[in-house]
Image (tube, grey):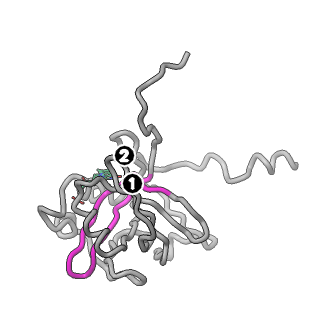
C-alpha cells in the first residue's frame, strides 16, 4: 500500500553541474542540480536559481550563463561551489578552477569541465522560491575524447540524489532496445 506524503518535487537523481555567470569583469560559479532539458529546436535548457543567490543578479544583468558538466574527478569543486557564495569569495580561485573566455558568450566557462553548454537567456519565470531561466544553447564546447559518434559521452558524471553524490555508471540498455527486440 502506498503512503501519501506532503507534495514535494521528489525527482532524483538529477545531474549536478556548475553554472558560470557574469562577464569578464565580474563573474561567479554556482552549483546547481535543478537544471533541465526543455526544448530541441531551438535547443533550450533551464536552470532554477533561488532568489537569495548572488548568481541571480549576474544572470539577470548579462542574460548569459554556461552549464559546465562535472565528472566525478571534480566532485570537490562541485560541492565547493555549492556551499560558499560569490559574495564572500572568488570561487574560481578558492576551488582552483580556471576561467576560460567563452566562445559564443561573454561569460567565462570552467576550463577543467570536459563539456560546456553556452546559453543566452530567452525567458525568466518567477516562481515562489526560485527564478527559472530558460537558456537557448548558442554553443557547445567539448574535449575531443568526450565526443563519440558526434555526441558528447562523458563517463562518471556526477548525479545528485537527496544530499548524496553518485557517479552515473553502467549502461543497462540503449534507446529503443525493446523495439528492436520486438522486430527480431
Ligand atoms: C549539489 C548542490 C545542488 C544545488 N542546487 C541548487 C539549485 O538547483 N538551485 C539553487 O538556487 N541553489 C542550488 N544549490 C545551492 C547553491 O549552489 C549555493 O547556495 C551557492 O553557495 C550559491 O552561490 P552564489 O551565492 O555565489 O550564487 C546547490 C548546492 C549543491 C551543493
Q: Residues within 10 Å of mark 2 (few under 14, many from 20)?
A: some
Q: Position of residue 50 (x, y in %)?
A: 29, 53
Q: Is residue 56 left or right of residue 135?
A: left
Residue 117, picture quadrant: bottom left
Give the residues in magenta. Answer: 15-36
Question: Eyeballing the image, is 50 above or below 88?
Answer: above
Residue 131 lies in the magenta stretch: no
Q: Look at the image and tell me in which quarter the N terminus lies.
A: top right
**Mark 1, other Cα within 10 Å: few <14 / some 14–19 / many ≥20:** many
Residue most toward the top? 1
Between 135 and 68, the residue placed more toward the observer is 135
Name the residue at 33% across, 56% down: 49
Q: In this figure, which residue is indicated by the disc labeled 2?
A: 165
Q: Is mark 1 within 8 Å of ligand 1?
A: yes
SS for dot 2? strand
Left or right, 92 with respect to 136, comes to left
In this view, the residue farthest toward the left is: 88
Q: Quadrant of residue 23?
A: bottom left
What residue did someone put label 1 on?
A: 16
Query: Looking at the image, how many numbered discs can be counted on the residues?
Result: 2
The disc, 2 or 1, on the residue closer to the chain's N-terminal end is: 1
Query: Which of these two is toward me, 61 or 94?
Result: 61
Above or below 4: residue 120: below
Q: Is residue 19 magenta?
A: yes
Whole-percent x and y of residue 85?
A: 18, 58
- Label 2 CB, ligand 1: below 8 Å? yes
Along the line of sight, the residue nearer the viewer: 126 or 115: 126
Point out residue 124 in the picture as x, y percentages from the top left corner. 40, 63
Compute the Cα span from label 2 to label 1.
8 Å
Q: Is residue 118 above or below residue 170?
A: below
Please say if the residues under marks 2 and 1 sit with CB atoms less than 8 Å apart.
Answer: yes
Amino acid at each position: 500500500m502506498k503512503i501519501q506524503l506532503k507534495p514535494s518535487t521528489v525527482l532524483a537523481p538529477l545531474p549536478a553541474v556548475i553554472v558560470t555567470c557574469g562577464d569578464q569583469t565580474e563573474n561567479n560559479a554556482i552549483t546547481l542540480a535543478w537544471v533541465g532539458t526543455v526544448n530541441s529546436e531551438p535547443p533550450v535548457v533551464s536552470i532554477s536559481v533561488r532568489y537569495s543567490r548572488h548568481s541571480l543578479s549576474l544572470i539577470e544583468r548579462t542574460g548569459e550563463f554556461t552549464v559546465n558538466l562535472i565528472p566525478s574527478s571534480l566532485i570537490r569543486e562541485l560541492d565547493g561551489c555549492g556551499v560558499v557564495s560569490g559574495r564572500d569569495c572568488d570561487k574560481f580561485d578558492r576551488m582552483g578552477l580556471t576561467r576560460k573566455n567563452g566562445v559564443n558568450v561573454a561569460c567565462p566557462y570552467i576550463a577543467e569541465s570536459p563539456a560546456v553548454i553556452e546559453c543566452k537567456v530567452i525567458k525568466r519565470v518567477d516562481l515562489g522560491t526560485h527564478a527559472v531561466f530558460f537558456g537557448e544553447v548558442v554553443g557547445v564546447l567539448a574535449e575531443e575524447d568526450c565526443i563519440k559518434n558526434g555526441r558528447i559521452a562523458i563517463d562518471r558524471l556526477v548525479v545528485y540524489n537527496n544530499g548524496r553524490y553518485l557517479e552515473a555508471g553502467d549502461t543497462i540498455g540503449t534507446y529503443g532496445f525493446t523495439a528492436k527486440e520486438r522486430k527480431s
